[in-house]
Amino acid sequence: MSTQNEYRADYPRSPIGDGNPYYRCACCGKSDPQINGRIDGHYEDCEWRVKQERSAFMDARSVNTGRTPEQRARDIMDQACLSENYVRNGVDAALRKDIADAIRDAVAEARRNMGQGIPEDIDGAEPPSVMGIPVDDPKWDEAGKTHDWRNHVGDNVKALWSTLTTAQRLAIALDAESDADCENWD
């Protein structure tokens, strides 16, 4: 994989001419001493530079295969601090697609894993509680003002509460607890 710090002199070159002993990039016209072997030594719109940066970015993307969606999303976000040149050269479009794909995959995986922590045979066992409040009899009218999961369960769900299984009640209570934990009061 190419990097910005790697010395590179494999770009197409042509003599500057007029008695000048140096060569220059045949794509952007910048002289060898100005380039000094650096990819970023070429002009930003240099065809060779653009090709090298795209190639390096695509190589970095291929390393992400076989990783979990969460790991891919983190890897992509780590790469998100791209130079303006990447944006101008179209690399950002590939990055946006990668982020969208990783988020889609992470959501799909989360949906497959939903309820994974709740045992199938929870009904008939000792009733679970969330934040010390039993899910089988949450006493809706005793809900506290803040950080109480009972405040995050809608009236329609409350009306159906007695018809739900213990596992369903626990799943709803855990989701509501997550919302209650996110309350932010000034």
Image (tube, rainbow, N blue to C red):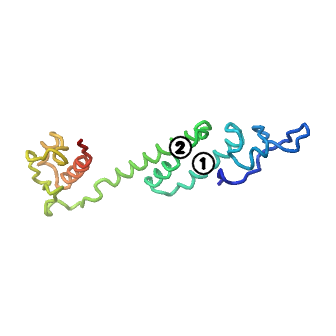
Q: Amino acid at mark 1?
A: Phe
Q: Amino acid at mark 2?
A: Leu
Figure quadrant of the C terminus: top left
Task: Name the residue nearer the viewer: 40 or 54.
Answer: 40
Task: Name the residue nearer the viewer: 90 or 110.
Answer: 90
Q: Circles 2 and 1: CB distance less than 8 Å? A: yes
Figure quadrant of the N terminus: bottom right
Which residue corresponds to mark 1? 57
Distance of label 2 from label 1 (alpha carbons): 9 Å
x, y percent for residue 42: 71, 42
* Crowd band around label 2 with a 10 angstrom C-alpha radius: few (<14), some (14–19), many (20+): many
Residue shown at the point (53%, 45%) measured from the top left? 81
Which mark identifies residue 95? 2
Q: Secondary structure at mark 1?
A: helix
x, y percent for residue 35: 74, 45
Task: Locate residue 152: give its quadrant.
Answer: top left
x, y percent for residue 135: 14, 54
Q: Secondary structure at mark 2?
A: helix
Residue shown at the point (9%, 52%) measured from the top left? 137
Task: Name the residue nearer the viewer: 90 or 121.
Answer: 90
Residue shown at the point (60%, 36%) measured from the top left? 88
Lower sequence index among marks 2 and 1: 1
Q: Give the left or right position of residue 78, taking residue 7 as reference.
A: left
x, y percent for residue 49: 69, 43
